[in-house]
Image (spheres, rainbow, N blue to C red):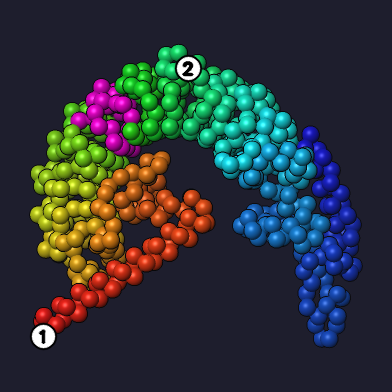
């Protein structure tokens, strides 16, 4: 419907362009339809020159537009009628403010952008959002939709989602947050979209019932294709149990702050979908029973245990002994001291492929760190945060044996200049070290280390003006200043986590950060002067 309407206008634009320019290269260009003219040569007027852009086929022009950013594309669409049509026809990704007043604009918008396959509809929480009628019209205009993101669309009901599922059966990725539709709408998507590969649900308010009384969701025809399921902040998230258990090709499971006991469900999932390669469990009621179930996934490569206080060394040992392909392990022990040397020693013995290890609120000693450094020869990224037992001796120990380590982060640990001096001669492949809130490490030492190893990037934040707390931010991002490559999406600096909160908050954060940086710089300078006077 939308395709035919827009294609007709697009074809008219192409025909008029081809008659005036493409088939008559010698003709003069009209300034309205020809945005770029070659400057005059030998005193001739510029309008006598050929307009080479107008000879460019629409398909090539569309490829040029696809290499531009959103702002540049918008500006290009205002140059002339032809560019306006081609830009709209070639746009595959669109993000709209999904307020209620979008409804009268839907038809004109999607007549122009009728090739959209990736759509984001986001509404301000203080505004009325689009309703079922608008979503139905959009689904009729975008039948080729493959990705859809819904944010704070609180006026959508099950009826609108049912119509969406009926009209957009090629959907591959659905992400919804802070919406109010319920199980009927979700089941309609799972029953209609046989190509669905990724499902992300956060704060879905329309799920009725509690515990066993909640209406079950799934599995549906989508269970055969689903590879990623992410559930966040769901009061009765276990109603997705049939979907998780029935998704035999599931590769990634992420569960954040969902109520209920998850041990039984993890047991049922592992019996059916043992090809899972990534599991993220954050603030869940899960114990060693659940970890024993996770150990039945022999292909597991990535495991995050964030503030799962009922998990102990016993559960980690069972995972390490059976999941020998483990590459990334993140543990936030929440200062519970239930995971320590015993579990980490098992990881060192059975997981030689370990490349990334993040320990937050865990207290390893020299015995486990020494074995990890010796056995895990592929360990490239290590973060030790909020540990009371990681001191100078432990740092010196791993510096001698972690040959492959490239990035090291130490935060809120009792280390000093004496222990950090091992970085000058150890870690031969180290390219970046970040030290934060370690009061025993001084600015003078950081400068000395930069000079000693010129190729090493050294970042030091003494944390004198900050609270030395260790916590995790929303979505499992570790707010511990761990600066690993983009592939490590769960570990980021605090300023990265705050960038999504809008320009006003971002600017205020940057200003505060600038003030703190200035204070730290002054403190370091004063210390240098004091040391200089003492030496003299």
Q: Which residue shows up at 37% across the image and 67% down it?
A: 515
The quadrant in which the C terminus is found is bottom left
Question: How far from the left and from the top, in percent, is residue 209?
Answer: 48, 17
The quadrant in which the N terminus is found is top right
The kind of secondary structure element at disc 2 is loop
Report the disc number at residue 462. Answer: none
Give the mark nearest the N terminus, 2 or 1.
2
Taking the image as drawn, is residue 5 in sight? yes
Q: CA distance from mark 2 to mark 1?
A: 75 Å
Q: Which residue shows up at 15% across the image and 50% down it?
A: 390
Q: Nearer the viewer, residue 178 or 75?
A: 178
| Relative height, residue 464 to residue 372 (above, below) | below
Q: As drawn, is 36 to the left or to the right of 302?
A: right
Question: How far from the left and from the top, in percent, is residue 498?
Answer: 43, 52
Dot 1 surroundings within 10 Å: few (below 14), some, or many (20 or more)?
few
Q: Which residue shows up at 45% across the image and 60% down it?
A: 508
Farthest top residue in view: 213
Highlighted range, magenta:
284-312
Count up the numbered dots.
Answer: 2
The kind of secondary structure element at disc 1 is loop
Dot 2 surroundings within 10 Å: few (below 14), some, or many (20 or more)?
few
**Which residue, given by chain and number where applicable, does mark 1 sit on?**
536
**Which residue, given by chain and number where applicable, does mark 2 sit on?**
209
């Amino acid at each position: 419907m939308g395709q035919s309407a827009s294609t007709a206008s697009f074809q008219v634009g192409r025909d008029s362009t081809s008659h005036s320019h493409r088939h008559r290269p010698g003709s003069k260009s009209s300034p309205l339809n020809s945005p770029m003219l070659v400057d005059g040569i030998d005193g001739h007027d510029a309008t006598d020159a050929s307009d080479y852009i107008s000879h460019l086929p629409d398909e090539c022009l569309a490829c040029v537009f696809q290499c531009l950013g959103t702002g540049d594309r918008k500006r290009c669409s205002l140059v002339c009628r032809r560019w306006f049509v081609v830009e709209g026809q070639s746009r595959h990704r669109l993000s709209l403010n999904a307020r209620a007043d979008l409804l009268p604009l839907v038809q004109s918008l999607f007549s122009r952008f009728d090739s959209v396959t990736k759509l984001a509809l986001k509404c301000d929480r203080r505004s009325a959002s689009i309703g079922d009628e608008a979503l139905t019209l959009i689904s009729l205009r975008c039948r080729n939709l493959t990705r859809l993101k819904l944010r704070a669309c609180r006026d959508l009901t099950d009826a609108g989602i049912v119509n969406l599922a009926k009209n957009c059966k090629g959907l591959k990725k659905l992400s919804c947050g802070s919406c109010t539709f319920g199980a009927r709408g979700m089941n309609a998507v799972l029953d209609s979209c046989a190509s669905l590969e990724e499902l992300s649900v956060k704060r879905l308010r329309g799920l009725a019932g509690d515990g066993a009384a909640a209406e079950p969701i799934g599995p549906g025809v989508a269970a055969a294709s689903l590879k990623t399921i992410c559930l966040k902040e769901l009061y009765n998230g276990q109603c997705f149990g049939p979907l998780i258990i029935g998704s035999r090709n599931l590769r990634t499971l992420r569960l954040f702050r969902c109520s209920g006991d998850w041990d039984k469900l993890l047991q049922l999932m592992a019996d059916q979908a043992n090809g899972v390669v990534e599991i993220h469990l954050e603030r869940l009621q899960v114990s060693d029973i659940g970890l024993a179930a996770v150990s039945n996934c022999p292909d597991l490569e990535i495991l995050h245990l964030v503030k799962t206080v009922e998990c102990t060394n016993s559960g980690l040992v069972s995972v390490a002994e059976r999941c020998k392909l483990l590459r990334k392990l993140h543990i936030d022990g929440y200062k519970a001291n239930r995971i320590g040397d015993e579990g980490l020693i098992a990881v060192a013995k059975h997981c030689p492929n370990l490349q990334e290890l993040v320990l937050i609120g865990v207290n390893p000693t020299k015995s486990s760190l020494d074995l990890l450094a010796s056995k895990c020869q592929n360990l490239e990224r290590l973060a030790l945060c909020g540990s009371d037992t990681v001191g100078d001796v432990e740092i010196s120990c791993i510096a001698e044996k972690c040959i492959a380590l490239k990035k090291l982060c130490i935060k809120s640990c009792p280390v000093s200049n004496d222990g950090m001096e091992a970085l000058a001669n150890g870690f031969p492949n180290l390219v970046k070290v970040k030290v934060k809130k370690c009061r025993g490490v001084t600015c003078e030492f950081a400068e000395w280390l930069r000079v000693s190893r010129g190729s090493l990037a050294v970042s030091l934040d003494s944390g004198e003006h900050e609270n030395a707390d260790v916590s995790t931010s929303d979505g499992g991002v570790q707010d511990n200043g761990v600066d690993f490559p983009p592939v490590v999406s769960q570990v980021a600096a605090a300023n990265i986590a705050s960038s999504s909160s809008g320009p006003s908050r971002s600017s205020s954060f940057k200003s505060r950060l600038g003030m703190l940086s200035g204070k730290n710089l002054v403190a370091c300078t004063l210390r240098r002067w004091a040391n200089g006077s003492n030496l003299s």
